[in-house]
């Protein structure tokens, strides 16, 4: 696992805690400031920006509203389960596809949100480095 993946995992861990974005950034700052030098931070920042802008229109919506986007697929899976219990074999397939789609959307939004948090932390480290 390279350093980028480790920092993304740390950002995902911070997302699991109930706190403000500023608190999450404060907890991630030492991990970035001590592990990366200026050129590595700049390279990671460019990579994160490229990944976030690669799927700009849908990525931004899913990053901000991942649960609302996944909700119809959860409903579809529930309907599939109902049809499956009523004896329709294809209902089980609909339920499986609905669960897969909803889970994939929520996982993608979670990963995008972790990338955004890591990018905001890098920008905060750079901003504080200039003012110190």
Image (cartoon, grey):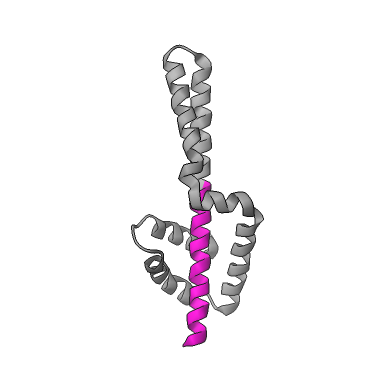
- The residue lying toward the viewer, choosing from 61 and 90, is 61
Residue 30, quarter of the rendered image: bottom left
Q: Residue furthest top?
A: 87
Instruction: Give the percent coordinates (x, y) of residue 76.
Output: 49, 28
Residue 15, quarter of the rendered image: bottom left
Instruction: Give the percent coordinates (x, y) of residue 94.
Output: 52, 24
Instruction: Give the percent coordinates (x, y) of residue 44.
Output: 59, 68
Q: Is residue 96 above or below residue 55?
A: above
Q: What's the residue at 51%, 15% (across, down)?
A: 89
Apparent side of residue 73 relative to residue 55 in the rendered image (left or right): left
Instruction: Give the percent coordinates (x, y) of residue 75.
Output: 46, 30
Apparent side of residue 79 relative to residue 18 in the rendered image (left or right): right
Q: What's the residue at 42%, 20% (across, down)?
A: 82
Based on the picture, tell me whether residue 130 belongs to the magenta stretch: yes
Q: What's the residue at 48%, 23% (across, down)?
A: 80
Q: Residue furthest left?
A: 18
Residue 78, quarter of the rendered image: top left
Q: Main secondary structure of the magenta part?
A: helix
- The residue lying toward the viewer, choosing from 56 and 42, is 56
Q: What's the residue at 46%, 88% (across, down)?
A: 132
Based on the picture, tell me whether residue 75 belongs to the magenta stretch: no
In this rendering, the count of numbered labels is 0
Which span of residues is magenta-colored? 108-132
């Amino acid at each position: 696992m390279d350093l980028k993946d480790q920092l993304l995992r740390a950002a995902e861990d911070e997302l699991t805690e109930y706190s403000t974005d500023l608190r999450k950034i404060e907890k991630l700052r030492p991990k970035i400031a001590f592990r990366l030098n200026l050129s590595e931070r700049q390279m990671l920042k460019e990579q994160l920006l490229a990944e976030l802008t690669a799927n700009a229109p849908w990525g931004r919506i899913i990053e901000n509203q991942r649960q609302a986007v996944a909700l119809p697929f959860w409903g579809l899976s529930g309907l599939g389960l109902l049809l499956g219990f009523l004896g329709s074999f294809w209902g089980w397939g609909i339920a499986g596809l609905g669960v897969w789609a909803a889970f994939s959307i929520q996982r993608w939004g979670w990963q995008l949100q972790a990338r955004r948090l890591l990018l905001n932390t890098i920008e905060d480290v750079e901003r504080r480095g200039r003012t110190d």
